[in-house]
Every structure is written in structure tokens, then in C-alpha cells.
Amino acid sequence: MKKFFTTLKNIWSITELRDKILITLGFLVIYRLGSFIVLPGIDANIINDPARKAEGLLGLLDAFSGGAFHNASIFGLGIMPYISASIVIQLLTVAMPYFQKMQKEGESGRKRINQITRVLTIFICLSQSIAYIKGTIPQEAIVINSTIFLFLSMIILTSGTIFCMWLGEKITDKGIGNGISMLIMIGIISSLPTQLFAEMASKGLSGLLLFILELVALFFVIMAVVALTQAVRKIPVQYAKQIVGNKVYGGQRQYIPLKVNSAGVMPIIFAQALMFIPGMLGNYFADKNEFLANMGFAFASFTSPAYNILLATLIIVFTFFYTAITINPTQIADDMKRNGGFVPGIKPGKQTSEFIDGILTKITLPGSVFLAIVAILPAFAVIAGVTQGFATFYGGTSLLIMVGVILDTLQQIESYLLMRHYEGMMKSGKIKGRSQVAMA
């Protein structure tokens, strides 16, 4: 405990780091305040009715926005349209040569890609705002002309998302951590105290021991997710020596760190986005087809075996798919060959590419299975007696995002401490966050 307080004192003594942390906290407070400002023209009493509850994919969006989605606030769409636009651009970068060329143009190409992403975000916001207003806001809650309300809300919701995007970029530039990820994390973690007290109240004094056991189980789940997030397979790379004048360059041995879970949280997001389709089809064709009616009933609850088996299968498939489009073994092998690097015992070029691809396949399989287990853990927690709100912290998207963002932030703080010759936050002095970059 003494070391912990000494570390906090060292963090506070570094002026630059202290200012970055305070700036980050200030921006996060602004984001949280905006999530409680209701859209003009809405009766807040109807919107805040406890009977209204977002479930399924809508519940996931509400968790990411920290309740702003459910509250019909000016930040109702949150940062998700920007995330969607970024995913689309990332897929286009893999599929279209035009975007591939821009990606290879360095800083100028990156700026153009960011500009295209922002423009695409605006169009996504305009389309999603219509669906949001029509599908989630009750008509009885609208107290002004519906056409005027639709027009104003589209502008306000789009402006709110752009403002959230600006906040995220400012946190990244002037604060600590990745701004966009930080906004998502603060939205998720904002509901933790409420859900924690609700779980404690549901157990009562007689169930205090059971509540403590639940917290212990949560601790071990978090440790397992941290291990999954940090696990890497290191491929050694040797660089040939080069003599330039009277100096010798290269010759050092480095490694390529391939993450066991290189796809991150994206497979779970993709899978959960598709999981509402079977239930929707079953409910829509319930009177016309008995099979579809039974399917809708089977997928009505996220604790049903059919739901969890399909979710786990989709996550495994999407993990392989996303890993394949984000990590290109051929490009890695070509870059190594161009820089005079090689894997010991493996010929440069095609054999190196096949070697990296084989290792990537071997580590992706256990990583995808573990990711699928993490995704369905909340269902098992509900079956074990944990309340549904608190069970979401036992796995799934929420836990993976929180762990990843916290590790990234700790790594940046660790770097500041080590640069100022202070002892790091861990005994090893190293936190292997998600921002590790392959050295090849």
C-alpha cells in the first residue's frame, strides 16, 4: 500500500502528466453531463419511466453511451456512429486499392482517411437518428410538432456525436489514453456503482457471503481477461549487419509480438449485432411458420442454450475473419525482407509468410474459443443468480473494453514515470498494453 501511495505522489509530481490527467477528467465530466440533457420537445418524465428498458443490441448501445441512449439525450447516439464509420473504412482499406494506397502515403494519407471517416460519420448519424427517433422514442413523449421534432433532433443528435468525436480527439491529443475508447469505457463503468448496490440489495444480509463470493469470482474473471488481452506469441527476428563507413548497423535480434486475441472486442460486437435477427424473424413470422415461431422463442432470452451456442460460434468465425483482414503475413514478410530481417531457420519471402500465417492460425483458435467463453459468461452468471445488470460485468463487450482501455492508460502513465526515472507501477516496470507495435 505504501508503494501505491508513493506512485500516486510521483504521478502528481510530474506536471505534464498531472495536467493531462486533469484535462482528461474534465472532458469526461463534460461528456457525462451531456448524457443527461434531454432532447428539446420531449417529456422527460415519460422518457425516464423505469418500465422503459433497452434490451439486446439496443441495450448494448445504451451501455456504451452510459444511459444517454435510453435517456434520449443530445448524446443519444454517442460515439458509435464514428466507430461504425471507422470499421467501414477499415474494411474498405483491405478491399479497395484506392484506400490501400492512401494508407501507405504516411501522414498525408492518414489525414485524408480521417477526413473521409468524419464525413461518413455525419451520413451515418443522419440515418441512425431517424431510426432512433422513430424506433425508440414513444410518440406520447413528444410534446411539439412531430415533423419539427424530427428535423431538430436529427441536427442535434448529429451535432452531439460530432462533439463527442471532438472530445475523444482532444483527450487523445491533450489528455491521457485513447479518447474514443475512454468515452466508451466511462459510459460502461458509470452504471457499475448502481448495479453493484442493486446486486447487494437483492442478496440482503442473509446473502452477504454469496455476494462476496460473486465479487471474488468477478476478480478472477477480470484477471483471466487481462491475461487474454496481454498474451502474445513472440516470433524472433534477426537483422543482418550492415557496414556503412566505419560503423556497423543492424545485427540485433528483435521479435514480432502476435497477440493471441489480435481481433480485440470486434468479433463480439459483430456477433451481437447479428443475434437479434433470429428472434426478429421468429416474432415476425410466428403466425405463419411453426419452426420460425419456435426459433423466436428460443432466441428470446440471452440465457438460452441456442442463443449462447450460436453467439459463441459466430464469435469464433468472426475472430478468424477479422484477424485475417487486419494482419497480413505477406506484408509482414515483405517488410522484414526489405529491412534485412529474417526469422532464424526460415527463408525470407514466401516461407516466412507461411510460417507467420501458420503461427497466427494456431494462436487464433484458442484465443477465439476463450473470447467466446468470455462473451457467454454473463449468461452463466444470470443462471447462477446474479442480477442481469451486474452480470454484464462478468464478461462480454463491456469487460473487454474496460480492461483494454485501462491497460492502455496504465501503459502511458508507466512510460511517463519511467522517463522521469521513477519506479514503475509494477515491479517488472512493464505493462504490455494493446498499443504494442511489432518491431519488424
Image (cartoon, grey):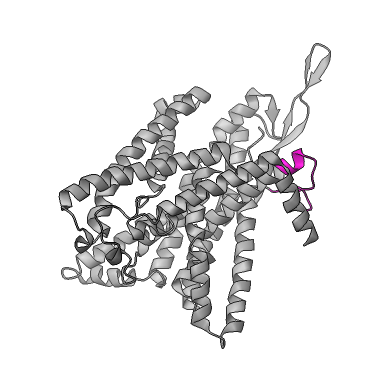
Q: Nearer the viewer, residue 33 or 61?
A: 33
Q: Nearer the viewer, residue 19 or 329?
A: 19
Q: Is residue 40 left or right of 99 when viewed as pictured?
A: left
Q: Say whether residue 95 is visible.
A: yes
Residue 352 in percent (x, y) is at: 63, 34
- Name the residue furthest right: 246
- Residue 279 in percent (x, y) is at 29, 65
Q: Position of residue 40 (x, y in %)?
A: 27, 52
Give, as a single range, the part of the protein colored magenta. 416-431
Asked whether 62 falls inside the magenta stretch, the response is no
| Residue 427 on the magenta span | yes
Q: Which residue sits at x=47%, y=27%?
A: 111
Towards the viewer: 93 or 235: 93
What is the magenta segment's predominant secondary structure? Answer: loop
Residue beneath the point at 62% across and 39% down: 355
Q: Left or right: 131 with respect to 429?
A: left
Tell me where residue 102 sits by quadrant.
top left
Residue most extreme to the top = 245
The image quarter containing residue 330 is top right
Looking at the rendered image, the quarter that the N terminus falls into is bottom right
Could you tell me if residue 262 is visible in this image? no
Examine the rendered structure and indicate whether residue 5 appears above or below residue 199.
above
Q: Residue at x 78, y 30 (%)?
A: 252
- How far from the left and from the top, in percent, is residue 138? 23, 62
Tally of marks: 0
Q: Is residue 416 left or right of residue 195?
A: right
> Is the residue 293 above or below the residue 277 in the image?
below
Quadrant where the C terminus is found in the figure: top right
